[in-house]
Image (cartoon, helix red, strand yellow):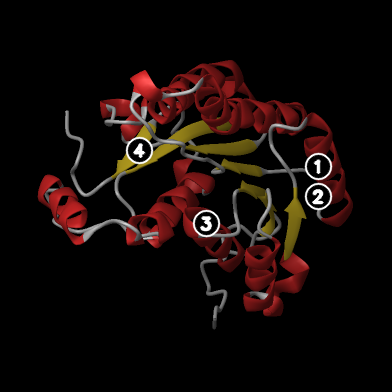
Amino acid sequence: MNINIGTEAFLSNKNAIVTGGSRGIGKAITLSLVNLGANVAFLYRSNDDEASKLLNEMDQFHDQLIAIKADIVNENDIKSALSQINDKFGSVDILVNNAGVTDDTLLVRMQLKQWENVISTNLTGTYNMTKAVLRGMIKKKSGRIINITSVVGEIGNLGQSNYAAAKAGIIGFTKSTAREVATRNITVNAVAPGFVETEMTADLSDEQKEAILQAIPMKKYATTQDIASMVSFLCSEDASYITGQTFNVDGGLVMY
């Protein structure tokens, strides 16, 4: 992969964390932030191969990028990750809470462990990471926090009551946290992707893909870069007066 930092490297000297940053949307965000000059620590939970692949792809930027294996539900993992980041780059300027899981089934069939797993990773993990970096940002009176939610958290979806609840919770969490830290020059926003071309959508049948496209006014899926571009904007100084907002990147799927 040939990536060049252009003249718009407006995140130079900024240190960022991207959770779930080794593949899919998280990978695109990691690549985008590095390309804009940021130092990035991407966290991943289990897939060593994907993490190594990304590091190899970005070898030309090895001074700007580190991979850290950490479970964002585990407090000790988070402490260890932040220690490594501080040693490598220094204090954190940007946090992107992207890590998430699904475990879909109709509510009448859903086991408690399926509910708890999705809520724990998607919602509690966002809380854990945000709380872990917030004191440092408050001390510096500067920071950007971007939480990846979903249109499912706004409109619901069959078989995803756990996922929808977690993603709706992230929207409320974003607004509350934004209010708490607004006077400290810290912005907290959410990005709500619609249907995105990833490994997950690749597994859908042709009939399922067609049904989804018919529901999207623009008649196409988002790319992972579409999501990364919105995140990058929210990290920039151009977005310094925007906080507590949820930005849908969904081709018009959800309109109010």
170 horizontally vs 129: left or right: left
Query: What is the three-letter code of the residue carrying label 1?
Result: Leu
Give the answer, above or below, for where 173 lies relative to 31: above
Q: Residues within 10 Å of mark 3 (few under 14, many from 20)?
A: many
Q: Position of residue 170 (x, y in %)?
A: 48, 26
What's the CA distance linking mark 2 and mark 1?
5 Å
Residue pictured at 36% horizontal, 57% vertical: 226
Check disc 2 and report its element: helix, strand or loop: helix
Give the answer, above or below, for where 20 lies relative to 65: above
What's the CA distance linking mark 4 and mark 2?
28 Å
Check disc 3 and report its element: helix, strand or loop: helix
Residue on which disc 1 sits: 82
Residue 139 occupies quadrant: top right
> Quarter of the image containing the N terminus?
bottom right
181 horizontally vs 163: left or right: right
Residue on which disc 4 sits: 247
Give the answer, above or below, for where 101 lies relative to 26: above
Query: What is the three-letter code of the residue carrying label 2?
Result: Ile
Q: Which mark is residue 29?
A: 3
What's the CA distance linking mark 1 and mark 3?
19 Å
> Quarter of the image containing the C terminus?
top left
Check disc 1 and report its element: helix, strand or loop: helix
Q: Position of residue 148 (x, y in %)?
A: 47, 39
Residue on which disc 2 sits: 85
**Can residue 50 be spotted in the picture?**
yes
Query: What is the three-letter code of the residue carrying label 4?
Result: Phe
Q: Position of residue 158 (x, y in %)?
A: 27, 31
CB-based contact (under 8 Å), mark 2 and mark 3: no
